[in-house]
Image (cartoon, grey):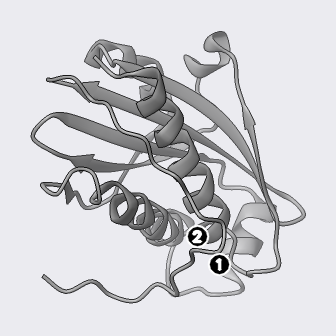
Amino acid sequence: MISQQAKESIERIFFHSACTRLPIDSGDACEITALDAQQAHCALASHIVVLTISSITFRFLLVLHFDDDKATRDYYLRDSEERSLSEALMEVGNLCCGAINQKMVEFFPDLGMSTPYQLSGACVPHLTELKPDYLAAFRLSVGANVQLGATLCVCASAPVDFVAHVNEAEESSGELELF
C-alpha cells in the first residue's frame, strides 16, 4: 500500500533529518548505511528509543538503536550527570522525528507525534508482528566514534503515495512549533 516513490521519499526525509538533528555539533558527520533484510530483523543495539508519527492513513515508527557505551555517553551527555543517556537520545530523537514530521506535514496535514519511549533492543524482531508495509534498517556513524542504528517502520491503512524533495540547504534551528 506504500508506493516505491513514497518509500524513497521517506528515506530522503529521514536521511536529511538524521544528518541535521542527530549530531550534537553541526560540524560532525552523520554517515548512514542501509542494511539488508536479514540485518533489519535483528537488534542493532541493546536499547531502543521509539518515536511515532501517526496520520489517518499510516503510522510511522522511527526506532533509534543505541548501546550504553562510553563513546555514546561521552558524545551525547558531555559530562552531564543531570540526565541519562536514554533521556538524551529521546531528546535528540525527538528533534529528528520532529524534522521528519515537519517535512511530511506538507503532504499529510493530519499528523501527530507521540512522546518518545525506551524499550529493550530485544523488541526489534517483533516489529514484523505489526505487518508493516515498509521496513528498513540503517547503521549510523555520528561524529568520530558513535554508532547508532535506525529502523523505519510504516504501517498503512490506505494507499500512501507522495514525492518529497529535500533541499539540502533547508535547515531549521530547532524552534518550537506552536499549535
- Dividing the picture into quadrants, the one containing residue 156 is top left
Would you identify the image quadrant in which residue 103 lies? bottom left
Residue 29 appears left or right of 88: right
* Position in image of residue 104 (x %, y %): 34, 54
Q: Is residue 72 above or below residue 25?
A: above
> Which residue is identified by label 1?
77
Q: How many marks?
A: 2
x then y, percent, for residue 88:
52, 72
Which labelled disc corresponds to residue 4? none
Which residue sits furthest right?
A: 144
23 up-or-down from 51: above or below: below
Q: Position of residue 179 (x, y in %)?
A: 12, 82
Q: What is the C-alpha distance between the residues marked 2 and 1?
A: 15 Å
- Picture coordinates of residue 170 (x, y %)? 57, 74
Other residues around mark 1 within 10 Å, as few (<14) / some (14–19) / many (≥20): some
Q: Nearer the viewer, residue 144 or 15?
A: 15
Residue at point 42%, 58% (across, down):
100
* Label 2 secondary element: helix
Give the residue number, with chain letter if any, for mark 2: 21
Q: Tell me the kind of residue under disc 1.
A: Leu
**Left or right for 71, reference 46:** right
Marks 2, 1: nearer the viewer: 2
The kind of residue on which mark 2 rests is Arg
N-term-proximal mark, 2 vs 1: 2
